[in-house]
Image: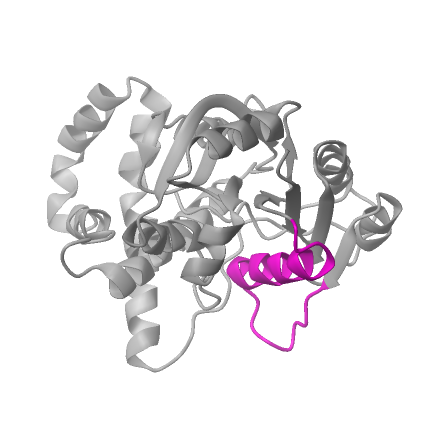
Amino acid sequence: MMRIGVVAIGRNEGPRLDACLSAAARDADRVVYVDSGSTDNSLEVAESLGAEIVRLDLSTPFTAARSRNAGFERLMSVDPSIEFVQFVDGDCEMVAGWVKTARTFLIATPQAGVVCGRRRERFPDASKYNALCDLEWNTPIGRAKSCGGDAMIRVAAFKQVGGYNNTVIAGEEPEMCVRLRRAGYEIHRMDAEMTLHDAAMTRFGQWWKRNVRSGHAYAEGFALHGAAPEHFRRKEVVSNYLWALPILWILWPLLWVKIYRSRPNRLYATFVTLSKLPQAIGQLTYVWNRLRGKRTKLIEYKISPPPGTPGGGWGEGEAA
C-alpha cells in the first residue's frame, strides 16, 4: 500500500496533543510534529511518541501555513517514499479507520488532490460556541471547493502547487485548494468520520475573535483570487460589508429567516447573522493594514493555559 505520513501542528495543546500524536502513530508510517513555541510539555510528549520534531523559528512571523509547509518538508526529507500526507491540528484526534478510508479513496480516484471527512467537536455540549463549531463543520459530501485544516493530500499535488501560502494568516487551506483546482485536481468530502476537535471556546470574546479571523481570511483570499473566473470569496466579502452597515440592521430578521430556512437551527441562524459584524471588522482590518503596508499579526481565539494544564493553542486553522 502507498505510504502515509502525518503532519501535526500545535502549541501548548497539553493532553490533546498526546491524543493527536498517539492516533497518528497508530495509523501512519511517519509522523512529524511542528511546534510553534510551546511552554508546556508538548515537545516531550512528541518525542516520547516517536514523532519527528520541527521547532519553528519564531523570529519569522508565524502562520499555520508556514508550520504545515515546514512539517511537509521534514516529512519528505526523512521519508521521500510518502505519497499521501494527512495534515491535522494538535487539538484534533484522528478517528480509527479514517487513514485507511482516505488512502483507499485517493488510490481509487487519481484526479483527487485532497480528501477530507467529517470533523466533529469533541465536547459540543460544553458551550454554545463549541456547538456552533460542530454545526459549522457539518458540510455537504461529494466534490467540494475547499478543505479545512484536517485533510489528506496527495504529495504530487501538494508539490505541484507549491504547498500552502506562508503569508496567509488564516484560510490557507481554501486558498491552496483554489490553486489545486486550477491545476486540474479535485477536492472531495467523504461521508466518514475523520477527526475529533476540541474548540475549547467558552466565552463570547473567543467566538468574536474567531470570526474576526474568518473575515480577515475572506478579504485576503479575495485579494489573491477574487478576479474572474474564480471570484474567490467575493460573495462572503460583499455580504459581510453590506449586512454590517447600521442602516441594514433593521433587516437582520429577514437575514435570520433566510439562514434558518437553509439550516433550521435557531442558535446557528442567530450567530451566523451576528457574525457579519466581526467578519466585516476582520475584512476592514486586512484592507487597512494593506493600505499602510503592514502585515496583520496572527489572530488567536484560544488562550494558552499555564504549563501542565489542558492546553489551548492558536486555533484549528480553518476559516469559517
For the point 45% across and 42% down, which residue is it? Answer: 148
Q: Can residue 283 be seen in this snapshot?
A: no
Q: Say whether residue 80 is left or right of residue 210.
A: right
**Image position, residue 202 (x, y; %):** 56, 36
Quadrant the C terminus occupies: top left
For the point 32% across and 82% down, which residue is it? Answer: 292
**Image position, residue 215 (x, y; %):** 33, 53
Q: Which range is magenta?
A: 55-81
Quadrant the N terminus occupies: top right
Q: Say whether residue 161 is left or right of residue 122.
A: left
The correct choice, above or below, for 303 with respect to 264 in the image is below
Quadrant for residue 285, please give it. bottom left
- Nearest the camera: 302 or 262? 262
For the point 17% across and 26% down, which residue is it? Answer: 258
The correct choice, above or below, for 247 with respect to 98 in the image is below
Residue 73, magenta (yes or no): yes
- Nearest the camera: 37 or 154? 154
